[in-house]
Image (cartoon, grey):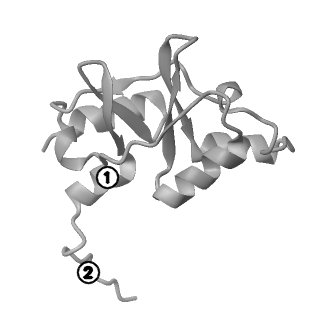
Amino acid sequence: MHVSDAMSTVVLTIGPTHTLRQAAALMSARRVGAAVVLDPDAGGIGILTERDILNSVGLGQCPDTERAHAHTTTDVVFAAPTWTLEEAARAMAHGGFRHLIVLDRDEPVGVVSVRDIIRCWAPARERVPATTG
């Protein structure tokens, strides 16, 4: 299977000046765990994840004043739709992250998460046998 088979094509894009509360509300409404941050001034694509927001709040920072750009990962590893799921999982394990932005011709076309890969490798219709003990 390929990344294109597993990725979510619901790509939430936000700007660098969105507050963390705004980002969290949009992520919650779209039911996604990451937002693609497009920063035309910095000339790049970054990612803001639920963990980034959680870390900020855990440090006592205010989600109404903290801006996405201050918490965005800009050193991003991108996936191609043609990558195998094994390649994506390897990149995630190596980098210690749970989301990959999928680019096609330098445009974000999807996001693939660890959860997406697991769903493909262990479909819901397959039941894990219960253990007795």
Q: Quadrant of residue 51?
A: top right
Q: Secondary structure at mark 2?
A: loop
Q: Quadrant of residue 70?
A: top right
Residue 116, label in figure: 1
> Mark 2 near mark 1, Cβ–Cβ under 8 Å?
no
Whichever of labels 2 and 1 marks the residue nearer the N terminus, that label is: 1
Question: Which quarter of the figure is the C terminus placed in?
Answer: bottom left
Residue at 63% over, 50% down: 24
Query: Which residue is more in the foreground, 130 or 84?
Result: 84
Q: Is residue 74 left or right of residue 106?
A: right
Q: Amino acid at mark 1?
A: Asp
Residue 8 in the image, given as x and y percentages of width and height? 31, 48
Picture layout, residue 97 above or below residue 73: below
Residue 54 shows in this picture: no
Residue 129 shows in this picture: yes
From the image, tell me which residue sits under label 2: 129
- Separation (CA) of disc 2 from disc 1: 22 Å
Q: Secondary structure at mark 1?
A: helix
Residue at 58% over, 30% down: 15
